Amino acid sequence: MAGAKVRVIIIGGGNWAATAHIPALQRHPDAEVVGLFRRDAVAARKMADDFSIPFASNDIPTLIRESKPDAAIVSSIAAQHYAQSKVALEAGAVAVTREVDGGLETVRLKLPAVVTTDLRLNEPRYPSLPNIMKSKKKPLDVRKPEDFGVDIAPRLKVLKTAEPPVRKSGVKVADVAELVRRLKTEAGVL
């Protein structure tokens, strides 16, 4: 994949995708947004046309099959992340870029895989002082979760809570021979 752009699909076409993910990826020299998923097919196609994204669908497996992405960004509401991520990952592979001595290396992994993150994952955006002052004058529109059709009723039931068992204190040994003897006889490790 050296020299090729990372092909990314966006799952979810809300405000966060439109104002943050898609514009940032389209500015990045090594990324290409190749697909967009929205639950409404017409809205998906319109938004894809607005951002010059070649593929749009209201079906994640179809979008993955048609657009052949290297990566997916789930930009939907948090309650949908797990289900949509699971469908996207069932496509079978993931591409990960990592830093090496000579620059960047992109590795394509078959799933399941463990991927960790480190430095430079997110660069914070700090508001300017004039924008902070302007925001103080704007009215704050307070809404309840019910206004958005979100059920916030607890779904988990705590059955029991207990303290962990008290840990035994350690034992000092005089030398290595005694350590080996204790590991063999008392701990049964060796």
Image (cartoon, helix red, strand yellow):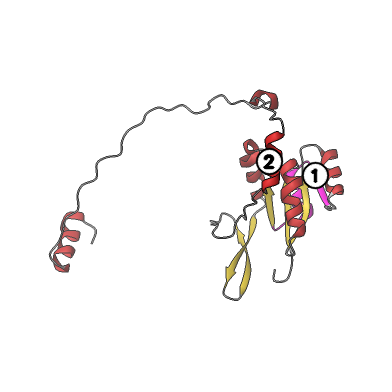
Q: Which residue is more in the foreground, 144 or 156?
A: 144
At label 1, the amino acid type is Ser
Place of residue 56 in the rendered image (x, y in percent of width and height, measured from the top left): 81, 47
Label 2: how many Cα within 10 Å (few below 14, some 14–19, many 20+): few
126 w.r.t. 43: above or below: below
Report how far apart the C-alphas of labels 1 and 2 lie in the structure. Answer: 41 Å
Place of residue 103 in the rendered image (x, y in percent of width and height, measured from the top left): 62, 73
Q: Which residue is more in the foreground, 119 or 163?
A: 119
Tell me, yes or no, whether the two marked residues, 1 and 2, touch with CB atoms within 8 Å.
no
Label 1: how many Cα within 10 Å (few below 14, some 14–19, many 20+): many
Residue at 64%, 50% in the rendered image: 126
Q: Which residue is more in the foreground, 27 or 164?
A: 27
Q: Earlier in the sequence, mark 1 or mark 2?
A: 1
Magenta stretch containing residue 62, yes or no? Answer: yes
28 w.r.t. 80: above or below: below
39 w.r.t. 28: above or below: above
Specify whether residue 120 is in view. Answer: yes
Residue at 71%, 40% in the rendered image: 134
Q: Is residue 147 left or right of residue 156?
A: right
Q: Which residues are magenta?
A: 55-70
Residue matched to label 2: 133
Residue at 74%, 41% in the rendered image: 15
Secondary structure at badge 1 equals strand
Check residue 57 in the rendering and tell me which mark sits there, or answer none: 1
